[in-house]
Amino acid sequence: MKYEGVLTKMRSELAETVQYYLIFESDFIHVNQLLDRKISINFLKFQCLGCKLQKKVFAQGYCYNCFSSLPQAGEWIRSPELSKAHLDIEDRDLEFEKEAQLQPHVVYLANSSDVKVGVTRKTQIPTRWIDQGAHEAIEIVEVPNRYLAGITEVALKGHVSDKTNWRRMLTNDIKDLNLEDEREKLKGFIPEEARNYYLAGNKETEIKFPVLQFPKKVKTLNLAKNPFYEGVLKGIKGQYFLFEDGTVFNVRSHEGYVVELNVN
């Protein structure tokens, strides 16, 4: 089978085992069905996710011009505490920013390698946890806008990491923790503006990924440097393909790459 299209992050569905899908313009791939099969990936060209032109991708699937100008690539995306729509202050497009920022957001703990704190829109749970390869996660607060979530994350990351050790996550070098206890330890560090939104009763969510074999040591595939690769798919975790020879391929970091996939 042959598929061709521009890569975007895999869509996922929480089930007994996470289900993954690749969506191309004219193709739909249920990635779980490719496990234990030989796959080749051939990089053809770039296509900016913003302007759709054949321009080199700079970041997040966008060319430099789009990354520098589009509201969906604003700095508040990466740093929620910089959100200003609640003050009626525009960054790049106030209407877009109000729609994105002035909705319920969750600050959470996710355990992918070690426990980390993060922020996401409420509608992105559990997708955000799956994307990070978390085998367990729990909500800390649910607040009405992105700014409150951002300042809460900033306050808490002084006491818990906000990064994922992706190599440990992919080799399954993990430990199970009681996230309800970890959440309780952080309760006193929540900013006063967000304390009334603390979620004391939520239970942790457990997530199982479709992996037949974890790599003992990972080597990353970068299509810009190595435009062709072939291997047997042994697992999917986070936004990564895991191959039999230890090669791992981060789909999300290759957004905007047009590829040809051949499945044998």
Image: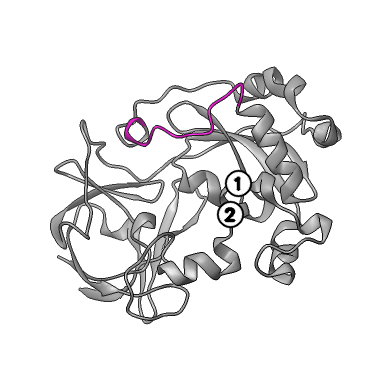
Inspect the magenta stretch and tell me whether residue 75 lies in it: no
Q: Which of these two is toward me, 48 or 26?
A: 48
Q: Secondary structure at mark 1?
A: loop
Q: Residue at x 32, y 37 (%)?
A: 170
Q: In the image, which disc is placed on residue 79?
A: 1
The image shows residue 245 at horizontal and vertical percentages of 14, 43
- Callout 2–callout 1 Cβ contact below 8 Å: yes
The image shows residue 196 at horizontal and vertical percentages of 86, 34
Inspect the magenta stretch and tell me whether residue 161 lies in it: yes
The image shows residue 177 at horizontal and vertical percentages of 53, 21
Q: Residue at x 68, y 29 (%)?
A: 155
The image shows residue 112 at horizontal and vertical percentages of 45, 33
Other-residue count near label 1 (Cα within 10 Å), few / some / many at <14 / 14–19 / ≥20 = some
Q: Magenta stretch: give its range.
A: 158-168
Q: In the image, which disc is placed on residue 75?
A: 2
Q: Residue at x 37, y 82 (%)?
A: 26
Quarter in which the N terminus is drawn: bottom left
Asked where in the image residue 81 lies, by quadrant, the reply is top right
Chief secondary structure of the magenta portion: loop
Mark 2: which amino acid? Answer: Glu
C-alpha span from label 2 to label 1: 6 Å
Q: Is residue 126 left or right of residue 255?
A: right
Q: Is residue 36 left or right of residue 7?
A: left
Mark 1: which amino acid? Answer: Ser
Quarter in which the C terminus is drawn: bottom left
